[in-house]
Image: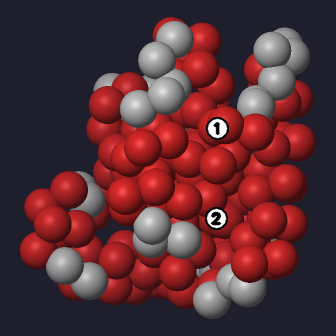
Amino acid sequence: MPVTDDEIAVLRAYLSENQALQQELQARLVSPAARSRYATFVAAAFFEAVDRRFAGRGTVADVIAFVADARARSDRAAESIDPQAAERLIRAGLTDEDVSDLDTETKGRLFIVLLAALVSDEHFSGDELDAFLAEARKTADGWLSK
């Protein structure tokens, strides 16, 4: 089943920093299928953001600098972002680096936290954020159809 408008609304609220709405909408994602689709959608959005930021022009040093900057944004970010794991996950989006040793919880936490930092740096308008999420939806739908 493809990503639903509900899952898109949750991520849009999160990326728009509307915590109250995000929590309200996320509470509605109760089925295992909905949670799985949402996790896939977040991963797709993460890889879309990584591609936009680093593909073709980002260096290893750029990745390291981005992760350091993301960690410096708050005490909570510093605690939740393992720098080596974050750098590897970003590089995995750009290369064939194997990250199978990272557990699902670590990947999920890094996807959402790093995605927020990547999107924040883009300073998307509402329409640009919608276009970004539409691209991520296409990717996630492709993954979910396999």
Q: Quadrant of the N terminus?
A: top right
Q: Position of residue 100 (x, y in %)?
A: 45, 27
At mark 2, the secondary structure is: helix
Sequence-wise first label, 1 or 2 = 1
Rendered image quadrant of residue 133: bottom right
Q: Amino acid at mark 2?
A: Val
Q: Dot 1, how many residues are within 10 Å of its Cα: few (below 14), some (14-19), or many (20+)?
A: many
Rendered image quadrant of residue 96: top right
**Res. 142 visible in picture:** yes
Q: Amino acid at mark 1?
A: Glu
Find disc 1 in the rendering and name its residue. Answer: 7
Q: Position of residue 146 (x, y in %)?
A: 84, 13
| Apparent side of residue 23 relative to residue 92 in the rendered image (left or right) | left
Residue drawn at point x = 67 percent, y = 77 percent = 53
Q: Dot 2, how many residues are within 10 Å of its Cα: few (below 14), some (14-19), or many (20+)?
A: many
Find disc 2 in the rendering and name its residue. Answer: 50
| Apparent side of residue 137 relative to residue 36 in the rendered image (left or right) | right
